[in-house]
């Protein structure tokens, strides 16, 4: 993951005059791809997703999930109970298309889109 983030930052660094709007567009792209992989029962985890300006750094964006249990679901590599009916009766565990490391996979998948997405919002100077 460190390598992926380093590559993304290097590509974005090549775009002169990058704007927070471009970074947010990229963040929302990653979040959208991640949300396709988030397991859902009541959609609390899905609804807690965010892409926002980072506090303390005007040139950074944070992408993540605010639900307290998000890290545990994200890092549950065994995906126990996958496909078994939920106690709530709402579908199956890890359904409908849920998978572990949903955010990390979306970030890796989006790596090539970083610079072009940010570039669409770059300001052109004189």
Image (cartoon, rainbow, N blue to C red):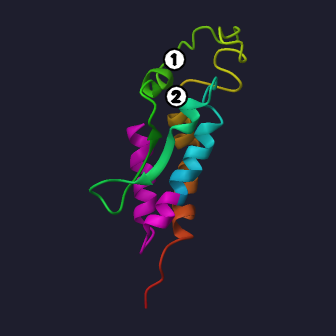
Q: Quadrant of the N terminus?
A: top left
Q: Position of residue 117 (x, y in %)?
A: 56, 62
Residue 14 shown left or right of residue 49 in the figure: left
Closest to the observer, 19 or 42:
42
Q: Quick one: SS at disc 2?
A: loop
Check if residue 14 falls in the magenta segment.
yes
Q: Which residue is mark 1?
A: 77
Q: Position of residue 8 (x, y in %)?
A: 45, 52
Q: Residues within 10 Å of mark 2 (few under 14, many from 20)?
A: some
- Note whether 112 is above or below 66 in the view shown: below
Q: Residue at left 51%, top 52%?
A: 27
Q: Quadrant of the C terminus?
A: bottom left
- Note whether 32 is above or below 12 in the view shown: above
Q: Which residue is mark 2?
A: 101
Furthest residue to the left?
Answer: 56
Q: Residue at left 53%, top 49%?
A: 111
């Amino acid at each position: 993951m460190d390598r992926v983030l380093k590559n993304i930052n290097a590509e974005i660094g090549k775009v002169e005059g990058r704007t927070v709007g471009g970074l947010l567009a990229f963040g929302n792209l990653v979040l959208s791809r991640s949300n396709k992989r988030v397991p859902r029962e009541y959609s609390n985890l899905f609804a807690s997703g965010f892409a926002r300006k980072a506090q303390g750094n005007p040139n950074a964006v944070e992408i993540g999930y605010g639900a307290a249990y998000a890290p545990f679901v994200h890092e549950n590599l065994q995906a126990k109970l996958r496909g078994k009916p939920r106690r709530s009766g709402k579908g199956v565990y890890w359904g409908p298309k849920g998978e572990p490391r949903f955010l990390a996979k979306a970030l890796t998948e989006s790596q090539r889109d970083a610079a072009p997405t940010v570039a669409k919002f770059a300001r052109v100077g004189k």
